[in-house]
Image (cartoon, rainbow, N blue to C red):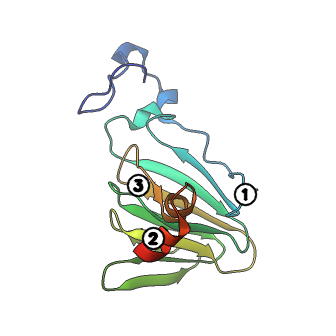
Amino acid sequence: LKAPIANSGYPCKPLESVTSDDFVFHGLVAGNTNNTFKLGVTYASVTNFPALNGLGVTAMRVDIEEGGLAPMHTHPGATELIIMVQGELTAGFVTPTSTYSKALKSGDLFVVPPGMMHYVLNTGKGKVIAYVAFSSEKPSIQTLDLLLFGNNLPSDLVAKTT
């Protein structure tokens, strides 16, 4: 991962040094939810799990405490699949003409198309555990409230432009 990245990804390890351990990731554990959003995430992407190099996928575990949320955000270059394991959350995304929102429970799957502004809220009792898959080995994120209010943009300008 210290070599320059090319169009096809990072250079690969020499085949003679590849082992079964290179294809296993042990880090999708509970994330720290002690924050403003009561949201904890752990992830496996090409930066911490090199086996994903060139495969175009990332995995993430999401833990959301009761009353917690993932605020309005987007992943410009990735589709997102939310796979519910425990609890209840409401997930949704918006388009210029519609809102698509659904309460999800264990066993449900929700898809967010690439670039759609979306959110998730823990709307049940207790903790939510979900897994997320992205169609990118290094998905980016843009969080609306942090972009609008986490800088020195004047409040009156935010009000006028939104």
For the residues labelled 2 and 3, the Cα–Cα distance comes to: 14 Å
Q: Mark 1 or mark 3: name the one nearer the start of the chain.
A: 1
Left or right: residue 11 compared with residue 132: left
For the residues labelled 1 and 2, the Cα–Cα distance comes to: 20 Å
Q: Residues within 10 Å of mark 1 (few under 14, many from 20)?
A: few
Can the viewer see residue 109 in this picture? Answer: yes
Residue 134, numbered label: 3
Q: Dot 1 corresponds to which residue? A: 35
Q: Mark 2 or mark 3: name the one nearer the start of the chain.
A: 2
Image x and y of residue 133, in percent: 44, 56
Image x and y of residue 102, in percent: 49, 83
**Quarter-wise, where is residue 62 in the image?**
bottom right
Closest to the observer, 155 or 35: 155
Left or right: residue 52 compared with residue 48: left
> In the rendered image, which quarter contains the C terminus?
bottom left
Q: Is residue 93 above or below residue 63?
A: below
Q: Which residue corresponds to the image point at 49% horizontal and 75% vertical from the top-left?
A: 159
Q: Dot 2 corresponds to which residue? A: 118
Residue type, mark 2 in image? His
Residue type, mark 1 in image? Asn
Kindly state the secondary structure of the residue where label 3 is placed.
Answer: strand
Q: Nearer the viewer, mark 1 or mark 3?
A: 1
Q: Which residue corresponds to the image point at 58% horizontal and 55% vertical from the top-left?
A: 61
Left or right: residue 8 compared with residue 90: left
Q: Which residue corresponds to the image point at 51% horizontal and 59% vertical from the top-left?
A: 153
**Quarter-wise, where is residue 142 in the image?**
bottom left
